[in-house]
Amino acid sequence: MQVCDLGGEPTGGNLTELRYTMQKPYGKDIILEKCQSASARSTLAVRIGEKMKESARWSKIIPIKAKSQQKEVWQYNSSEGTENYNVDVRLGKPLDFLAFKSKRMGAFKADLLAISKSRKDVFKNKKNLEHVKFCPVCGYDTESSIEAVNIYNAIYRQCSNCAHYFVVNRPSPSFLESFYSEDEQYQGPYTDKNEINIRVLNIVAPKLDWVIKQFKRVYGREPKSILDVGTGSGHFVHLCRERGLKADGVELSKTGIEFCKNNFNIELFNVDFISEWSKFRDYDIICFWGVLEHVPYPCELLSAASMALSGKEGLVIAEVPRWDSISTAVQEVFSDSITRHLDPLGHISCFTDTSLATLFRDSGFDITAAWYFGMDAYEWSIQLSNLFGKNKVNKKMKELMPIFQQTLDKAKLSDEVVIVGKPSEKAE
Ligand SMILES: [Zn+2]
């Protein structure tokens, strides 16, 4: 057994101070520990006992001709045999780009100036940063990781074990905590009153419909309750309640909490889900929409969800950015004009299917569904507009974007995926 310290601030080294210790399913791999002191962040102890790389363990059985709905088998191979996960896959999502992104396209130059300056300032000041010694997903030593791209002085590397991408000189947990709780600009796009209906109709409703469909498929009944962790401004919680579900949200951002109170009359929980998970055992579904890529240790959040859902019929849902996408390819070329996707504050992680599968499995979930879609056509379009002048390019691209994106989604070249996991049957 090899135990690795995953970095972060020192925990004091006193095991009696651990808030919890979690034994992962299968009796191997990961023990999660957290210090009681509020300022100390987590230390993750990881055992890497077997030599075969995670990226080599995973394989997929997929139809040669892709369909918008298809069945896939994701396989995990080890010396103990093969684990098969039957995954219900959806490719593509209709999106009214014009309704949703017109304003942002017009504001691209201004957004770019603000974002590039703020990121360069953060990543040039070493006081804000910590060196990541071990992969945030699998705990493998980052010495053997490979540099992928440098954006605003933030360096993305790829784990040589699980294929996960992460910012190796990442902002420290204390910096991130105050950034998300105080920064108004980050919540900006989500706290536009005029966009409430567009956002709910275009972004939130299709996701809620799909989540409910997945729960019915897995458990044969309607879900009654949903918890949205990192809910932002509360649009998702609002729609859930409109649909008659018991729904609550957990959020750190003061701007998000205020917006939600003022516009939806919903009080969000301003608590740390990782330490307070036992207060949230009364939900059928726990969602992390665009959350895992922002935190130093995504496995902490999923493990907390795993404990909150243990022993009951439940689903965990996570939407994350994907590395293997056209947006990544475009941004590698236009690395000095990035406002989304590989924006290193706060996308400090970017997932591959392998790293996601590893994360879910190690946190005690069986993957049961995946939905691929993205904004790659939009990314391509804004970079061309920035290069050639927006009037010439934007008009034509706006018409072509939905068609372009549909093709990319079908080929799984899109920059987002939503994964659904159910508590592992092996853990029972
Ligand atoms: Zn890894």
Image: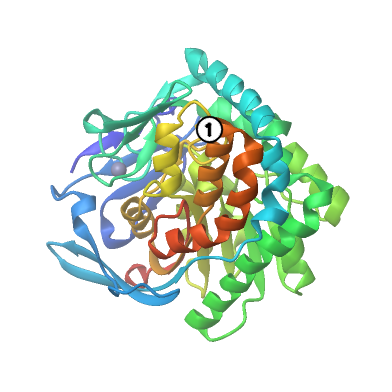
For the C terminus, give its image quadrant: bottom left
Q: In the rendered image, is residue 108 in sight? A: yes
Decide which of 327, 15 is in the foreground and name it. Answer: 327
Question: In what quadrant of the picture does the N terminus appear?
Answer: top left
- The foreground one among 108 and 389 is 389
Q: Quadrant of residue 188?
A: top right
Q: Residue at x 55, y 65 (%)?
A: 93
In the image, 48: left or right of 70? left
| Amino acid, disc 1 | Ile
Q: Which residue is mark 1?
A: 338
Q: Residues within 10 Å of mark 1 (few under 14, many from 20)?
A: many
Q: State left or right for residue 327 relative to residue 135.
A: right
Q: Secondary structure at mark 1?
A: loop
In the image, taking residue 133 as reference, residue 187 lies left or right, namely right
Q: Is residue 68 above or below residue 235?
A: below
Give the x, y percent position of residue 332. Answer: 40, 34
Query: Which residue is at a point 60% across and 50% down the rendered structure image?
Result: 396
Give whichever of 404, 227 is nearer the camera: 404
